[in-house]
Image (cartoon, rainbow, N blue to C red):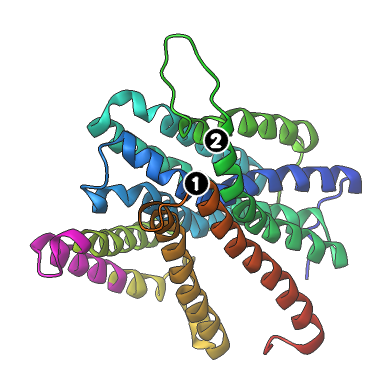
Amino acid sequence: MIDQTLRIHPLAAWAALVFASLGVLLGGAELMVVAIALPSIVADFGGWADLARVSWIVNAYLLAYVVAMPLAGRGADLWGARRLYVVALLLFVIGSAGAGISRFAGSEDGLTWLIVSRVIQGFGGGALVPLSMALASHLFGGRARGAALGLEGAATYIGMAIGPAYGAWVLLNFNLPIPGLDIASWQWIFLLNVPIGIVTLLLIYVVAGGIETPRVRAGLDLGGAGLLSIALVAGIGAVTISGANGWTDPLVLGGLLLGAAAFAAFVWLELRSRSPIVDLRLFANTAFSAANAVSLLTGYALATAIIGGPVFVNRVLFGSDVEASLILTALTLAIAVGALIGGLLAGFIGERI
């Protein structure tokens, strides 16, 4: 096997890795922080009357986050992880800025603006995860590579763990007055990402501006990426709309059929592609398939808790934003601790743990 570890000073490598993990941490925090602010955001955009549309404030980010991952992983092979990391972080910053100023567009247009901005933000945030992993795998070799990959993997969970408390703190304490502008406290949850993201970009440029990961010559599976995106958007959109319109609604049925057709075409194309965006042949391995099935189910449960937990605390239990943040913080901390313990036990006992 060819050693593709980049030849740079270890201190520079660790500095680049730590700064890259900041972007991943931001993206992970954004998975949770908006859940705390959701009641305040919805109140500014006309209340809970259109729950299906309001849910896209969270769903848009999650969906774009997931879609971006396989695309970014393949893109790192073609164009370099460091270069694409900068692009992804810029997208996250632009999306954050758009979400932060969406309130000024009014209740109707502002909600649409917010959802579109969340798509941009989510695409950037999701892309940061595989790109930072690619950087870690090329910056380090041997045992240090495992530690580096562990740090990048933990960054998402750390962000998710601090997100609820950070969101509650911003809502309660951060309200920087700007002359001539009526800015709600929830807007700062997005706007604060802008200076943090820019500083992170500058730090990465200083320590890693002259390095790049190896690139390979291969095609980008645009057809597969497009079909996967259509399948996810149509399927999740139909399920979301069904809550208000019912399962027999033509729009819901059409979305489900479109999603199923796009997914079938995606599977057909990937099995015949020389450079698939997702190598479906891996699912022939029973352990791999079982692990992904468990991940799907736990992800579904986690997304339900992220969206429904703060709303339940706020509207049913009449709790505060702080109480909602404590509940989500306990959940995400337990996930982070479980992941750490599970990884350690797997090293001693084996993956069957």
| Residue 26 shown left or right of residue 96 in the figure | right
Mark 1 Cα-neighbour bin, 10 Å: few <14, some 14–19, many ≥20: many
Q: Which residue is mark 1?
A: 321
- Position in image of residue 279 (x %, y %): 49, 73
Q: Which residues are magenta?
A: 243-264
Q: Which residue is mark 2?
A: 172
Q: Residue furthest top?
A: 179
Identify which residue is drawn at 61% across, 38% down.
Answer: 86
262 within the magenta span: yes
Q: Is residue 261 above or below residue 43?
A: below
The disc labelled 2 sits on which kind of residue? Answer: Leu
Quadrant in which the N terminus appears: bottom right
Q: CA distance from mark 2 to mark 1?
A: 8 Å
| Residue 351 shown left or right of residue 40 in the figure | right
- Residue 207, numbered circle: none
228 within the magenta span: no
The disc labelled 1 sits on which kind of residue? Answer: Asp
Mark 2 Cα-neighbour bin, 10 Å: few <14, some 14–19, many ≥20: few
Figure quadrant of residue 77: bottom right
- Of residues 200 and 249, which is closer to you in this image? 249
Secondary structure of the residue carrying tag 2 is helix
- Of residues 186 and 323, which is closer to you in this image? 323
Identify which residue is drawn at 50% across, 73% down.
Answer: 298
| Overall secondary structure of the magenta section | helix
Residue 216 showing in the rendered view: no
Quadrant in which the C terminus appears: bottom right
Would you say the residues marked 2 and 1 are in contact, meaning their CB atoms lie under 8 Å apart? yes
Identify which residue is drawn at 53% across, 80% down.
Answer: 282
Identify which residue is drawn at 58% across, 64% down.
Answer: 331
| Residue 139 shown left or right of residue 183 in the figure | right
Question: Of marks 2 and 1, which one's residue comes earlier in the chain?
Answer: 2
Secondary structure of the residue carrying tag 1 is helix
